[in-house]
């Protein structure tokens, strides 16, 4: 059996290049699992910083290269500098590694291509140099690729304005609802950010294809616009987490005890609160969230990861004793350092998800039909919340300064009020559509088969 399996994979090696952030590691390893199930042999190349757990994926080969990062530098506030540093540090060792394996490769066991996280744009330059197919993988919404449609001015000074760059794209109500223009303007004062956008845009245009972790019906018009703008095939094969087995790629230890706590709660009664792996806040914001959750008088499961509050390892000393006593006495609160999120969202007791609106979290919520309370922080999150609240209408946004009364009102609007019930029904409708897309002859199923054929024919 093993010999037959190895023969099946002969000549089908793929090198996948990972960006070292939890929200990027997860989908890349899920994609690797999907492609492995299609008969490809997988090599995972990653920077030393935030290395994924190799033992969780024994079927893959892992290669670590210097990434030029430290725990201090890889933070949300320095994301542009982080991307730049990684691309400077990783390009030369990546090229040396590929040259070594190409030098000794069996012509019948060739490297079929390089698939790289769009932030790791050096991989496309190396692939071009070595005449290998390069495929860009987008871990965010397809619409976010339009935010990279800014170009360096022909005279080499500055950048063409956003409106002129997208003059070939017809304006439509749905694009306007996403407020792409506002998102671009937010980065206009940072020349380094614009430079990185231009570099990522060029590498994406040079790719032989684009893989997007999305579902066709969620972004149908934007997928068409992206393909028109970049000019290469685009494969929306998401959500990856539904197509890949459930092995964990979390960098943090998941506390599964919260599942037994959920088992004791009423159907759709719990608000699940998690702001992802990189968000930070100050002590006052933490206290306002705690007070709002307590005052809502609804059960809550709250993820407070170590380091969430700047300068504090965890929350025992930050939250007042009165809060802990109230939570323990009423038995309606559960606080953990990290949760098995996909399992939590699939649990029948969870009726709402208060999130930072990372794309992975949104897809996981959509697939389980869970409505959302939104608090975007940085990056693509302001774009994502427009999808949730204005286009799909499956969530509410908490805007402005975090304040306990506002938090309590938002939670109760989502979980109890008639407005929230309508939102819940729309969320459940999206879940049904997502399940269909994953079934045989669904859009994701077909796009995956087309991607495989594209790789094999390159």
Image: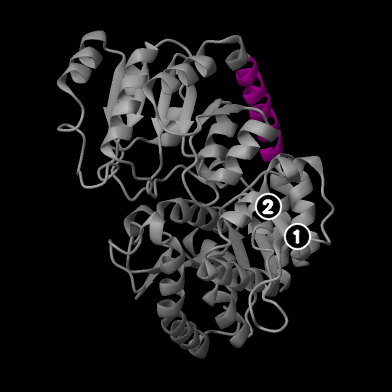
As rendered, which of 70 and 403 lies closer to the eye? Answer: 403
Circle on res. 181: 2
Q: Position of residue 322 (x, y in %)?
A: 18, 17
Element marked by disc 1: helix
> Is residue 208 or residue 302 the one in the foreground?
302
**Horizontal and vertical percent position of residue 454:** 72, 65
* Residue drawn 65% across the image and 76% down it: 133
> Mainly helix, strand or loop, the magenta region?
helix
Which residue is identified by label 1? 163
Classify 138 as above or below 108.
Answer: above
Tell me which numbered mark, 2 or 1, is placed earlier along the sequence: 1
Indicate the position of residue 283 as horizontal and vertical percent values: 26, 36
Closest to the observer: 215 or 10?
A: 215
Say if 384 sits above or below 5 in the image: above
CA gap, disc 2 and disc 1 = 8 Å
Judged left or right of residue 367, residue 219 is right
Answer few, some or many: residues within 10 Å of disc 2's Cα (few below 14, many 20 plus, some between 14 and 19): few
Q: Is mark 2 on a helix, strand or loop?
A: helix
The magenta span reads: 422-440
């Amino acid at each position: 059996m093993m010999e037959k399996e190895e023969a099946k994979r002969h000549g089908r090696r793929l090198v996948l290049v990972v960006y070292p952030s939890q929200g990027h590691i997860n989908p890349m390893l899920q994609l690797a699992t999907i492609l492995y199930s299609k008969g490809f042999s997988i090599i995972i190349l990653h920077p030393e910083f935030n290395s994924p757990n190799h033992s969780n994926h024994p079927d893959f080969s892992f290669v670590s290269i210097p990434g030029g990062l430290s725990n201090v530098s890889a933070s949300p506030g320095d994301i542009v500098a982080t991307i730049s540093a990684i691309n400077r540090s990783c390009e030369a060792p990546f090229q040396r590694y590929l040259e070594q394996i190409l030098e000794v490769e069996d012509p019948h066991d060739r490297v079929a291509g390089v698939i790289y996280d769009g932030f790791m744009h050096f991989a496309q330059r190396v692939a071009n140099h070595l005449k290998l197919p390069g495929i860009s993988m987008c871990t965010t919404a397809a619409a976010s690729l339009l935010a990279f449609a800014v170009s360096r001015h022909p005279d080499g000074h500055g950048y063409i304005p956003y409106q002129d760059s997208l003059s070939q794209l017809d304006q439509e109500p749905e694009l306007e609802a996403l407020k792409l223009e506002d998102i671009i303007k937010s980065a206009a004062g940072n020349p380094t950010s614009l430079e990185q956008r231009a570099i990522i845009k060029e590498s994406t245009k040079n790719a032989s294809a684009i893989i997007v972790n999305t579902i066709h019906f969620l972004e149908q018009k934007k997928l068409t616009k992206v393909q028109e703008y970049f000019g290469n095939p685009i494969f929306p094969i998401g959500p990856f987490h539904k197509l890949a087995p459930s092995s964990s790629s979390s960098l943090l230890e998941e506390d599964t005890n919260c599942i037994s706590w959920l088992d004791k709660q009423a159907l759709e009664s719990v608000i699940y609160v998690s702001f992802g792996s990189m968000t930070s806040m100050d002590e006052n914001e933490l206290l306002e969230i705690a007070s709002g959750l307590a005052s809502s008088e609804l059960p809550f499961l709250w993820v407070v990861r170590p380091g969430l509050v700047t300068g504090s390892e965890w929350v025992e000393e930050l939250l007042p004793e009165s809060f802990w006593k109230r939570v323990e006495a009423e038995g309606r609160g559960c606080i953990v350092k990290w949760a098995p999120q996909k399992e939590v969202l699939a649990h029948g007791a969870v009726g709402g998800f208060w999130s930072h609106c990372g794309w992975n979290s949104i897809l996981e919520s959509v697939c389980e039909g869970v409505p959302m309370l939104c608090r975007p922080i940085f990056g693509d999150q302001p774009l994502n919340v427009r999808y949730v609240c204005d286009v799909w209408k499956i969530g509410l946004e908490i805007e402005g300064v975090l304040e306990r009364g506002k938090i309590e009102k938002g939670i109760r609007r989502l979980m109890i009020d008639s407005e929230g019930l309508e939102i819940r029904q729309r969320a459940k409708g999206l879940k049904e559509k997502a399940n269909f897309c994953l079934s045989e002859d669904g859009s994701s199923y077909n796009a995956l088969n087309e991607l495989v054929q594209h790789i094999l024919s390159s």
